[in-house]
Image (cartoon, helix red, strand yellow):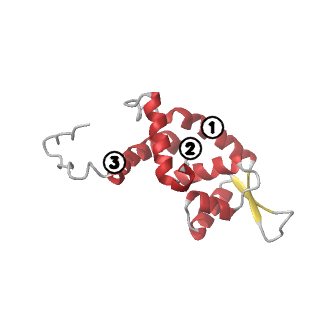
Amino acid sequence: MPPRKPAPGELDQSRLMHLVGYAASRASIELKKTFARHLGPLELKAVEFSVLVLVAANPQVNQKQLGQALDVSAPNLAVTLDRMVERGWVERVRSTQDRRAQHVHLTARGRELTQQAEKIAATMENAALRVLSPAERALLIELLLKVAWPAAAK
């Protein structure tokens, strides 16, 4: 794709356009706006959405596993989970196998919110990604995941 000519008053970004990180960051900015527009009305942040979906898919998940999966520090995740507990979306439940461990479970309200959010998320990126064919979209996801998890790509 040839570099885009800047519109009058726009900065020339052509010297950054060859950097994957720059392109990924620009795309991320647009997709974050999409997320905020669609899931913002649910008062749901991206990390909270990710926690809800991971907890829904992994019934015996603990805080450490969530932090590792999302690359969120333990203190930051603790604050996020505290907020989610306060909102009635999740609860911490002591493990019956290891009394030192706590699992994170969805509450009934959290299950309902997760279902609602996942339904919205299933189509929320369509407008932003309309410039891609379904095959290009699938390839983009595949390539981004290869970069995100290089060991898994082998």
Q: Residues within 10 Å of mark 3 (few under 14, many from 20)?
A: few
Picture residue at 59% right of the left edge, 70% below the top: 75
Name which of mark 1 and mark 3 comes first in the sequence.
Answer: 3
Q: Which residue is mark 2?
A: 42
Neighbor class of circle 2 (other Cα within 10 Å; few <14, some 14-19, many 20+) is few
User: Is there a contact, CB below 8 Å, between mark 1 and mark 2?
Assistant: yes
Residue located beneath label 3 in the image: 23
Element class at badge 3? helix
Amino acid type of disc 1? Gln
Relative to 127, is 12 on the left or the right? left
Q: CA distance from mark 1 to mark 2?
A: 9 Å
Q: Residue at x 33, y 48 (%)?
A: 23
Does dot 2 land on a helix, a strand or a loop? Answer: helix
Q: Is residue 78 visible?
A: yes
Q: Amino acid at mark 2?
A: Leu
| Between discs 1 and 2, the one toward the N terminus | 2
Residue closer to the observer: 112 or 130? 130
Residue 45 percent location from the top left of the image: 53, 51
Task: Confirm whether residue 125 shows in the render.
Answer: no
Give the x, y percent position of residue 34.
44, 41
Relative vertical location of residue 63 with respect to residue 133 in this rendering, above or below: below
Q: Which mark is residue 22?
A: none
Compared across the picture, whether 19 is left or right of 40 comes to left
Query: Residue 116, which numbered label?
Result: 1
